[in-house]
Image (cartoon, grey):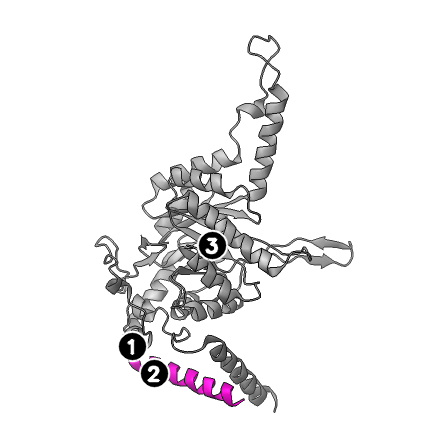
Amino acid sequence: MAEISEALKAAMASAAAKSAAGSNATDQLRPGIVPIQEQGSPAAPADHPATEHGVDLSTRYLGLELSSPVVASAGPLSQTVDGMKALEEGGVGAVVMYSLFEEQLRHEAARMEALTELHEESFAEAMSYFPTKAANTGGITDRYLELLEAGAKALEIPLIASVNGATHGGWVDVARRMQDAGAAAIELNVYLVPGEVAVSGAEIEARHLEILQSVKDAVSVPVAMKLSPYFSSFGHMAVELGRAGADGLVLFNRFLQPDVDIEKLEVVPGLELSQPSEARLPRTWIAALRGRVEASLAATTGVETADDVVKYVLAGADVVMTTSALVRHGAQYARTLNDGLASWLARKEMTLDQARGLLSVPADVQADAYERAGYVAALEKAKAVYGR
């Protein structure tokens, strides 16, 4: 317990120092981490409008210059060009298109193979040869790429393409085509539920690295990995992905957890919009990884109000993604999130860069001891509050 107590003291001292440092906290408390402007990154463009509070919210993500850290994550609002334009007009800094699924790619490939076999012995002079209607209809991939191309031309903000899958195959070709269609970056959403008991954790980690490496070798645009938290050592996995070339890490994917209907005796699939309480896990890991990985850190899940955006920024997120809040309140709600963030920054007399990572785990503190100290402190507080 002595070791934990010392870590707790260090954590409390660090938090107090950060609070006292005020607007200079970023420079003073993050040794070795150079602010964006000092890294040679270009200053915010003049055409980036400040909010009504006079605060510049421009930021960088995946090396891309964004007018706002609020980003529309992959979801139903990006299924049309009009939907994307509405998000842009609402104030998001970038749009992640809805995902193209690996299963769709496999189904499409099988369909094309079947069509080829159907007509492989036909010849042009045959009077009875008429290709089926399906043979002349654009597939799912083509429709996605056409929308991506149209959206990239219509938007002034970056449009990020998304592929959702779990195995090694099928990513490379479609990623290359997404780049050619105008994607500013590509998000690889690795939705992998390791339900096969014969597959080891090492194999799961290796698969993620193989997927990333194969796509990075095929494209020149930035590549982000959207991940689940379910690794035996997520921090190590994040560092390894950064070393392998991931330009960004998106934390976290939400696994859809089915319910059980006890009357019909069946499993009921369900999809619920995220709630603010779900932000605690990704926020914890973003705070732990800030300054320990070179990749951009994107927060997703649990965003409902501007306060949620502020909390993610304080933890160290470069951008804060949301779909649920925009679905609930409409694309224009991004403006409310931006204004709330700007209002908080103005009230605290801080810039966005100064606030970012202010409450992250200090770079010179052992992260596991820091987290353990917080855990023990929380339990001690619970005993004092509820043990009366």
**At label 3, which amino acid type do we have?**
Met
* Residue position for label 1: 28
* Residue position for label 2: 17
Residue 173 drawn in magenta? no
Is label 3 in a helix, a strand or a loop?
strand
The residue furthest left is: 46
**At label 2, which amino acid type do we have?**
Ala
Q: Earlier in the sequence, mark 3 or mark 2?
A: 2
Is label 1 in a helix, a strand or a loop?
helix
> What x and y, as percent, mark residue 38?
24, 64
Comparing 165 with 46, the one in front is 165
Q: Quadrant of the N terminus?
A: bottom right
| Distance from the alpha carbon under mark 1 to that under mark 2 | 9 Å
Query: Which disc is residue 218 wearing?
Result: none
| Distance from the alpha carbon under mark 3 to that under mark 1 | 31 Å
Q: Quadrant of the C terminus?
A: bottom right
Q: Earlier in the sequence, mark 1 or mark 2?
A: 2
> What x and y, as percent, mark residue 60?
32, 57
Label 3 packing within 10 angstroms: few (<14), some (14-19), many (20+):
many
Query: Which stretch is magenta?
Result: 1-21
Q: Earlier in the sequence, mark 3 or mark 1?
A: 1
Q: Name the residue at 34% across, 63% down.
A: 339
* Residue position for label 3: 225
**At label 1, which amino acid type do we have?**
Gln
